[in-house]
Image: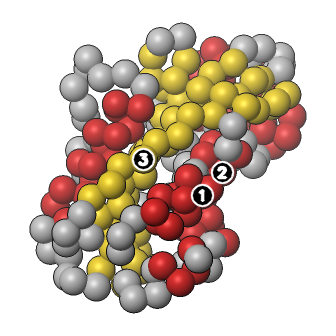
Amino acid sequence: MFFKKLEKYNVLLASGSKRRHELLNGLNVDFKLISQEIDESYPKELIKHEITDYLAIKKSDHLKKFLKKNELLITADTIVWFNSCPLEKPKNKNEAIKMIKLLRNNSHEVISSVCISTNKIQKIISETTKVYFNELSDDDITYYTSNYDVLDRAGSYGIQDYIGHLGVSKIEGCYNNVLGFPTSLFCKTINKMKL
């Protein structure tokens, strides 16, 4: 059973994402937050989940070597993949507006990777969800980017926000993955791991 698998571990989450915090809380995982500054650059030849895998592992690299016997570290990364390019966090509101204008009346993929590490093993998993957007007016996009925290979000949007309620017509795959953490795949993986 999932809830028993992590009982003997002190779970460490190295992520500033409020959505990941909420999702782990929803799984009743007792965890401690670890903050770190990471250069999120990656080799430009990487595509799709190769990017998120690389960054989730990179986020664990420095911390993994200090893990104690009873500690389990979780790191993660999420991107939006559109038109053969990654859309990461926007640098400013103008860039956020441009991104959402690209996504409207179109589909894109949200890809998340999670790296699970102990002092003995490391496992990387990734999930892809396809998201379809309705047509959105320029006024709605401007309103959204002016009133919500778009700078902290891959692709400049949160599916749980105003723009998600208004703009997302359907998804194919895991909803929580779009929030940045594929909970179902994470639980299956933990259950299979020899912890």
Q: Which residue is mark 1?
A: 183
Q: Is there any visible trace of residue 171 in the rendered image?
A: yes
- What residue is drawn where x is 78% and y is 38%? 164
Compared to residue 68, the image places residue 158 above or below, namely: above
Q: Amino acid at mark 2?
A: Asn
Which class describes the residues within 10 Å of circle 1: few (<14), some (14-19), or many (20+)? many
The picture places residue 137, in percent across and down from the top left corner, at: 83, 19
Q: Quadrant where the N terminus lies?
A: bottom right
Compared to residue 5, the image places residue 74 above or below, namely: above
Q: Which residue is mark 3?
A: 125
Marks 3/2 in contact by CB < 8 Å: the verdict is no
Q: Is there any visible trace of residue 14 in the rendered image?
A: no
Callout 3: SS: strand
The residue furthest top is 83
Q: Which residue is mark 2?
A: 176
- Seen from the viewer's position, the closer of residues 137 and 128 is 128
Callout 1: SS: helix
Q: Amino acid at mark 1?
A: Thr
The picture places residue 8, in percent across and down from the top left corner, at: 39, 88
Compared to residue 170, the image places residue 114 above or below, namely: below
